[in-house]
Image (spheres, rainbow, N blue to C red):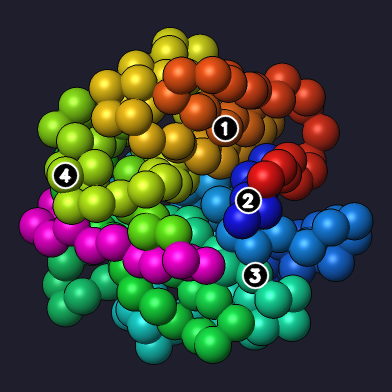
Amino acid sequence: MYVGTLQMDIIPKQKEANLNFIDSTLAQTAQRVDLLVLPKFFTTDIFFTTKEEFVALAEPIPHSPTCHRLADIARRHQTTLVGSIIEQDGDRLYNTAIVVNPSGYMGKQRKRHLPDYEKQFFDSGDEIHLFEVNGVRLGILICFECWVPEACRALAAMGAQMICHTANIMSSATYEALRVRAIENATPIICANRIGSEKAMNHFTGMTYLEPFHFYGANTSTDEQIEAGA
């Protein structure tokens, strides 16, 4: 399976512009990717100060404009896309990764382990799901969850053969944590991070593919791009 991660400088609150960037970048990619992992909150970014800002950007899943647009992008580029958005379910908000393929919406994974900042605005998910892509069982971690050993272990114990990490990283130490998780569970991890800065906070550049024992690759370019490999 040919997998890729998208490194992008997310434009805050500009969903259509960010989705257009994903679409156009896939169109310019020399080789089609079977799976593309997107950064956390790839349509909106994250650092807002009130719950009202998050509510204004939240969407029901799967009946949401972002899910429909991603399904169209996946169909036209014949790929599977994974990334997190702000989900609204009644009066609750979740940081939720969605999975879409050329046939449409496959499912979602709500973030189960929240850092203190997100606890102000989001509820925690309570279920774990795996998704099969090209015969490979995928699990999903969302950003901070890579620091929780049990989160990755639960996916591996369920039979995940690869883990997608949709992230918004501001420290190189997170990549070391990811490497440990890959080794602990003998499971490759594909991490997609955003680049750029927001509200004086710089995001640590990098897209990473971690193979537990024999390969550790990281891209440190500051360009918006897809990094891919088999």
Between marks 4 and 3 in the image, the one whose residue lies nearer the viewer? 4
Residue named by callout 4: 157
x, y percentage for residue 104?
51, 85
Alpha carbon of mark 4 to alpha carbon of mark 1: how far? Answer: 21 Å
Question: What amino acid is at disc 2?
Answer: Val
- Graded by Cα atoms within 10 Å as few (under 14), some (14 to 19) or many (20 or more), the crowding at tag 2 reads some
| Image side of residue 200 versus residue 131, left or right | right
- Is-magenta flag for residue 76? no
Q: Earlier in the sequence, mark 4 or mark 1?
A: 4
Residue 89 occupies which quadrant of the picture?
A: bottom left
Is there CB contact under 8 Å for labels 2 and 4? Answer: no
Question: What amino acid is at disc 3?
Answer: Thr
- Graded by Cα atoms within 10 Å as few (under 14), some (14 to 19) or many (20 or more), the crowding at tag 1 reads many
Magenta region: which residues? 121-135
Q: Secondary structure at mark 4?
A: helix
Q: Earlier in the sequence, mark 1 or mark 2?
A: 2
- Which residue is located at x 18 percent, y 58 percent? 128
Residue named by callout 3: 79
- Graded by Cα atoms within 10 Å as few (under 14), some (14 to 19) or many (20 or more), the crowding at tag 3 reads many
Q: Which mark is drawn over residue 113?
A: none
Alpha carbon of mark 1 to alpha carbon of mark 2: how far? Answer: 9 Å
Residue named by callout 1: 209
- Which residue is located at x 49 percent, y 74 percent? 100
Q: Secondary structure at mark 3?
A: loop
Q: Which mark is drawn over residue 3?
A: 2
Q: Earlier in the sequence, mark 3 or mark 1?
A: 3
Residue 75 occupies which quadrant of the picture?
A: bottom right
Q: Earlier in the sequence, mark 2 or mark 4?
A: 2
